[in-house]
Image (tube, rainbow, N blue to C red):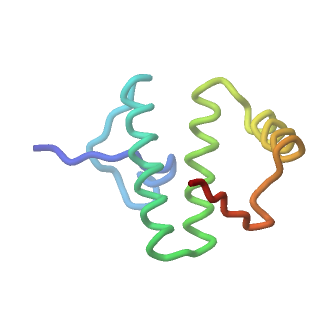
Amino acid sequence: MVKQKLVRDRIPEIYGPQKRHIADDKEYLQELLKKLQEEVDEFVQDRTAEELADILEVVYALSEYHGTPVNKLEAIRKEKAKKRGAFKKRLIWEQE
């Protein structure tokens, strides 16, 4: 069985050529979602700024995939924070 995963664009030039292919839209989305989970899992373990940057890179790719430029995504985030707040106050909602 062939093991495959989505890698950053420059990985082949950094590590040398490996067997690879270009994903179609369906496979690309599936691989982005797997990569997002992988990067979140790594952040949960390591909790470093580098792992957060990796998550952000995948989020940016997902945003572009869905037709939303990164600057538009940031504008949406800011507007949502303005309307509903962010997570700075560390509020925990308790329901009974």
Q: Residue furthest front?
A: 96
Q: Is residue 76 left or right of residue 1?
A: right
Position of the N terminus, as image quadrant, is: top left
> Where residue 93 sits: x, y (%)?
66, 58
Q: Is residue 58 left or right of residue 24?
A: right
Residue 30 or 80: which is nearer the viewer? 80
Q: Is residue 96 above or below residue 24?
A: below
Residue 38 or 77: which is nearer the viewer? 77
Q: How many marks?
A: 0
Q: Residue furthest left?
A: 1
- The residue under the point 34% across, 50% down is 17
Q: Is residue 78 above or below residue 90?
A: above
> Where residue 72 sits: x, y (%)?
80, 33
Q: Is residue 74 left or right of residue 12?
A: right
- The residue under the point 62% across, 59% down is 94
Q: Is residue 73 left or right of residue 29?
A: right
> Where residue 82 sits: x, y (%)?
89, 45
Position of the C terminus, as image quadrant, is: bottom right
Q: Quadrant of residue 74?
A: top right
Residue 33 or 81: which is nearer the viewer? 81
> Where residue 87 sits: x, y (%)?
75, 59
- The residue under the point 43% across, 49% down is 35
Q: Residue furthest right?
A: 82
- The residue under the point 66% across, 23% down is 67
